[in-house]
Image: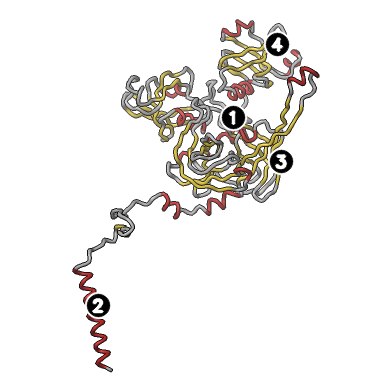
Amino acid sequence: MKKIVSYVLIAVLAGILTLSGYKIFFEPTVKSDVLTTNPETSTAPIVNTHFVRSPAYAAETTDFTKAAAETVDAVVHVKNTAIQTYRDPLQEFFYGRGGARQYKQVGTGSGVIISSDGYIITNNHVVANATEIQITLNNKKEYKAKLIGTDEANDIALVKIDEKDLPYLPFANSDTIKIGEWVLAVGNPYNLTSTVTAGIVSAKGRDLDGNNRIESYIQTDAAVNPGNSGGALVNTRGELIGINSAISSQTGSFVGYSFAVPSNIARKVVEDLMEFGNVQRAVLGINIIELNGENYENLGASVSEGIYVKKVLDKGSAADSGLKEQDIIIKVNDNPISKFSELKGQLSSHRPGETVQVTVIRNGEEISLPVLLKNKFGKEELGATDYIDNVLGMELKNISDSQKKNLNINYGVRITKIKNPSFERFGIKKGAIILGIEREKVFSVDDVERLLRDNENNAYVTLQILNTNNKIEYISLKL
C-alpha cells in the first residue's frame, strides 16, 4: 500500500514538473498591460490598456449626491398665469365691439431660492406678462409670489414669497469655472419636480442672438428641457454658478446643449433690482471691432483675438482712464477677453462707480489700466438724480410739485436744452415736457434712464411730449 501511494506522489510531482517546464520554455509570454481577445471568435489586434482616465471614470469617482441633496429643496416650481384677450374681427365687423373674450394662459418653469426670507430668482420669460405667480416648494407647499423686478436683456426676474427659514443656494463666482468642469442642472422639466441631470461645462461666453443682446451664456451638455428655465446650474459643491435659460434645439427638447446665465451676472441683476428697482448698466464708452483671423492683419493688430478699440468716446469711462484708439483689450480683471460677448459679460457683472482692471496690448506691449465705470449717460453715481446733461440730444430736469400743479399734471420731466435736430423738425422746443416713453409714464429723470435702458435693444423709442403750446406730440427717435 505504501508503495502505491509513493508511486502516485511521484507521478503527480512529475506531472507538475512537466507542466512547469512547458510553461517556462514553450508557451508564449503574454504581458499584463495589454488586452487580448479570443482568437477563435475575433481577429482583433492586441490593444494597449495604458489609457488616460476618461471623463466617464471621473464621473464615477465624483460624488454628485451631496450637491443634489443641497440643491433640490432650494429649487422651486413656478406657475405663471396670464389673462389674454381674444377678439374676433369678423364678429366685430357684424356685431360691433364688445365681443372680446378673455382666457387664462398658464406657463410653468423653475426658480431658485437665493435667501432664507423668500427671494427667488427665475427667468424673465418664465414670468413675463403674469397676472399671478404661484410658487411650489419641493415639499409641495404653495405660495403666491410678488414680482420684484425684471431684466429682459439678461432674461432674469426676481420674485418673493412671504416665508422664513427657507433653504437657499449661495452664489459662486462664475468667472472661476473651467471648461470640462462637472455641473448639475436642477429644475422641473415637463412639470416633473426636482429633476437633477449632470454634465460638463462645454463653453463660456456664448452669444445666442448673434446681435449680442443676450450676454455671455455658460454652455453645458447637462440635459435641460421645457420647464427647466429658471432652474439652477450648480457645481459639485452645490453652489449656484448659473440660471438655466435656453436650449439649442429644432424640436423644442434637449438635443445636446443647454445655456445658463452666469451667476455673477444674475447676482448683480438681482442686487440692482432689490436696491434700485432697475438694472444699473456700465459701459466703457468705446466703439469696437472684434478681432478674428480675417481682419486682424488689415487693422495692424499683433494678435488675432481680442477687442480692437476703434474709437474712444468723449467723457466716457475709457477716455477718463487712458484707453486709446488701436488698443486691443485682452483681459478684464484677469479674465481673458477674446470676443465681444465675453467683454459684455464682464461689464454686465459690474455697475457704474466700480473700478475694473483692463489689460490691453498697445504697440506690442501689455499694459493694465484701472477703469472707473460709468453708465451710457456718463455718470458713475447710483440712485436718484435731479438732472441729466445729455440723453437723446437733450438736457432734462425733474419738475417740482408746485410746477406740476401749475401745469395740471402729476408726472413728467422738463426739457431744458435741445441739441437733436429731430426735435426742430417736429416743432418741439425747450421747456416741453416728456410725459412718457414707450407708453410708460415718466415721473423723474431716473425713469428716463431706466426706460431707455429697458429699450436699448430697440432701433427706435417713442416719446410722449407735452409741447410748449400745451399740445401732446409723439416722437420716435433712433437710439
Distance from disc 2 to disc 4, alpha carbons, whole Å, reads: 112 Å
Q: Earlier in the sequence, mark 3 or mark 4?
A: 3
Q: Secondary structure at mark 3?
A: strand
- Number of numbered tags placed on the structure image: 4
Q: Earlier in the sequence, mark 1 or mark 3?
A: 3
Q: Is residue 189 left or right of residue 287?
A: right
Residue 253, image quadrant: top right
Could you tell me the amino acid type at mark 1?
Glu
- Above or below, 298 against 366 in this view is above
* Residue at the left extreme, as displayed: 25
Residue 12, percent across and down? 26, 82
Q: Which residue is mark 3?
A: 144
Q: At 72% from the left edge and 8% from the top edge, which residue is drawn?
A: 470
Residue nearest the observer in this picture, 330 or 44: 44
Q: Earlier in the sequence, mark 1 or mark 4?
A: 1
Q: Which residue is mark 4?
A: 472
Q: Is residue 218 left or right of residue 31?
A: right
Mark 2 in CB contact with mark 4 (< 8 angstroms):
no
Q: Which mark is residue 16?
A: 2
Dot 2 alpha-carbon crowd within 10 angstroms: few under 14, some 14 to 19, many 20 or more: few
